[in-house]
Image (spheres, rainbow, N blue to C red):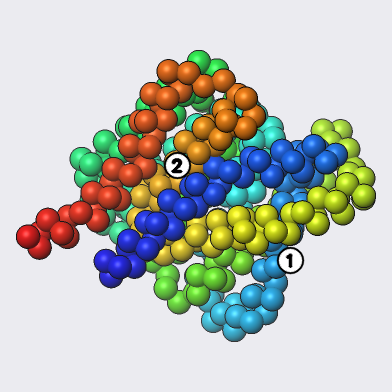
Amino acid sequence: MLHHHRRAVWAGLFAGIAWGLFWIPIRLVESAGLDAPWAMAVFTLVPMVFCLPVAWWLRRDYVTGGRGLIGGILGGVAFALYSASLLYTDVVRAVLLFYLMPIWGFLLGWAILGDRITKLRWLAIALGIIGLYVIFAGDTGLPLPRNIGDWCGLISGMFWAVGCLLILVDERVDPRIHAVNFFVVGAIISLGAAVLANANGLSVTPDWEAVQTSVLWMIPITLLLVLPAGFASIYAPTKLNPGVVGLLFMLEIVVATITAAIWAGEPIGLREYAGLALVLSAGVLEPFGALLRPRASAV
């Protein structure tokens, strides 16, 4: 059990790092001539195509899975809503609202599973939220929802917390099926959002040549980054409290901020570094404390 717990922690950390690099290929797709909604659609459709053979191979799980399938489906909905929030509100507001997720996760774990919200967990939540606020508060202030993009960000965090809980409590479904559902549902909703944005004049129909060019170099990125990140995102909640998963995913903010400063020339100063240190502390405090407790009790 301890071995599986540790592996899930490492999967969550890897997912946070991988999604923190997600902005780089998205920006490359946009620079190839695709508006942001269509760039996100391409980025979810390509992984979905690779997942379809897995869905066929494990097709019996869809017959026997029943309600257990909902966890991965909600994960895909959450991913699509988070992507939409990045398009329809300020990025900083979307991030702040989505990463209230550890609160929803720990509350669900307490209410449904009977997991205690320990002092260490409250401290981790506080460090994470304060860190995010330190990084972003100068740009957005208190992030109370005020438009459709804000609500997408808030609801996506809630959906992801519920999805993580369902994945944890229902062990009948192969985690790979959850991952397939994550990508397929995310792709369907992202494509729908792109079509809707096109209809409302928020984007233009992409040039087919630009799409073909993007898909070609998206294939290795999908195999090396997107698919592993998606499967790691699903494996982590198979063994961990949803709140812990949310804290681990916060590493995305640290990686995205630092890599954007290095490769995109985005400014980063003392305030950002202080906030990043707080977020990083939140992300590792509770899970690594849990890993060390068995060793301490064994001494």
Residue displayed at 21% across by 45% down: 118
**138, above or below 143, in the image:** above
Q: As drawn, which residue projects farthest toward the bottom?
A: 60
Residue 126 visible? The answer is: yes
Dot 1 crowding, Cα within 10 Å, few <14, some 14–19, many 20+: some
Q: As drawn, which residue projects farthest toward the front?
A: 262
Q: As drawn, which residue projects farthest toward the left?
A: 299
Residue 166 x %, y %: 45, 62
Distance between mark 2 and mark 1 Cα atoms:
28 Å
Residue 182 visible? The answer is: no
Residue displayed at 67% across by 79% down: 56
Residue displayed at 54% across by 75% down: 66
Residue 278 x %, y %: 35, 31
User: For residue 9, what is the image quadrant?
Assistant: bottom left
Identity of the amino acid at label 1? Val
220 or 203, which is in the foreground?
220
Q: Tag 1's secondary structure?
A: helix
Query: Which quadrant: the C terminus?
Result: bottom left
Question: For mark 1, what is the residue?
Answer: 49
- Judge from the rendering whether residue 266 lies leftward or rightward of residue 289; answer left or right: right
Q: Which mark is residue 251?
A: 2
252 or 170, which is in the foreground?
252
Residue displayed at 50% across by 70% down: 175
Identity of the amino acid at label 2? Leu
- Judge from the rendering whether residue 208 lies leftward or rightward of residue 262; answer left or right: right
Dot 2 crowding, Cα within 10 Å, few <14, some 14–19, many 20+: many
- Judge from the rendering whether residue 163 lies leftward or rightward of residue 287; answer left or right: right
Query: Which quadrant: the N terminus?
Result: bottom left
Tag in front: 2 or 1: 2
**65, above or below 122, in the image:** below
Q: Which mark is residue 205?
A: none
